[in-house]
Structures are given as C-alpha cells and as structure tokens.
Image (cartoon, rainbow, N blue to C red):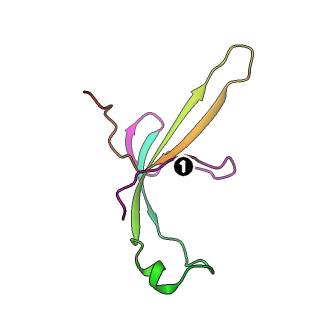
Amino acid sequence: MRGVDLVARVHHLRKVDFRRGLKQGDLDQLVVDRTPQQLKWMSAAEYATFPDIIFVRHLKYKVEQRGFRTREITLATTLLDSEPLRG
C-alpha cells in the first residue's frame, strides 16, 4: 500500500514447500499468500485496507563458511523480479 518492499528471513519452524508455486529457478518460486485473520489489536477499518492476496517470492540458499556448518537460509520477499538490477 505504501510502495515499500520487504525482504525477511523465514522463521526456521515455518516449512516452505518449493513444489507448490510458480518456479523461477532452483529453490526460487512465486506464491500467493492470503491475508490472515484480523488480529485482536487491529481495528476493522484498518484490517479492511489490506489486500486479500499478496505475491511473495521464496528463495533458499546455502551459507558456506570455512570451519562452520553449512546453513540453509530461506527468504521471503515482495521483490518479485528474478533479474538483478543493471545500471
């Protein structure tokens, strides 16, 4: 609504299924998320301003650092373009 994009790490307990969404590449997909139920602290007027659906891109990558375990990180973002910026 404000034109702000988000990039956030997905909580480690949330399972992201890379088999369901529009494939953008290996471990890269676009999915549609629905608006959750209204929260108790939110007014009905404020909740009504949110869209019913939002497009989200999920990415997974490995962080390899010598001397440490390899970790997998999953990101969720509203930046949907898979091409890097060129300038």
Q: In the rendering, at what x and y percent does residue 13 appear?
A: 69, 51
User: Residue placed farthest to the top in the image?
Assistant: 66
Mark 1 surroundings: few (<14), some (14-19) or many (≥20) residues within 10 A: few
Q: Main secondary structure of the magenta part?
A: loop
Q: In the rendering, at what x and y percent does residue 15 appear?
A: 62, 51
Residue at 40 percent of width and 76 percent of height: 49
* Residue 17 vertical placement versus 62 (above, below): below
Report the quarter where the N terminus lies: bottom left
User: Residue placed farthest to the left in the image?
Assistant: 87
Residue at 59 percent of width and 48 percent of height: 10
Q: Nearer the viewer, residue 66 or 23?
A: 66
Range of magenta residues: 1-27
Q: Nearer the viewer, residue 15 or 76?
A: 76
Q: Nearer the viewer, residue 86 or 55?
A: 86
Report the quarter where the C terminus lies: top left
- Asked if the magenta segment contains residue 15, the reply would be yes
The answer to which image quadrant residue 52 occupies is bottom left
* Residue 54 vertical placement versus 5 (above, below): below
Residue at 48 percent of width and 70 percent of height: 35
Left or right? Give the position of 4 relative to 69.
Answer: left
- Asked if the magenta segment contains residue 18, the reply would be yes
Q: Which residue is mark 1?
A: 17
The answer to which image quadrant residue 37 occupies is bottom right
Q: In the rendering, at what x and y percent does residue 84 appear?
A: 33, 31
Q: In the rendering, at what x and y percent does residue 82 appear?
A: 34, 37
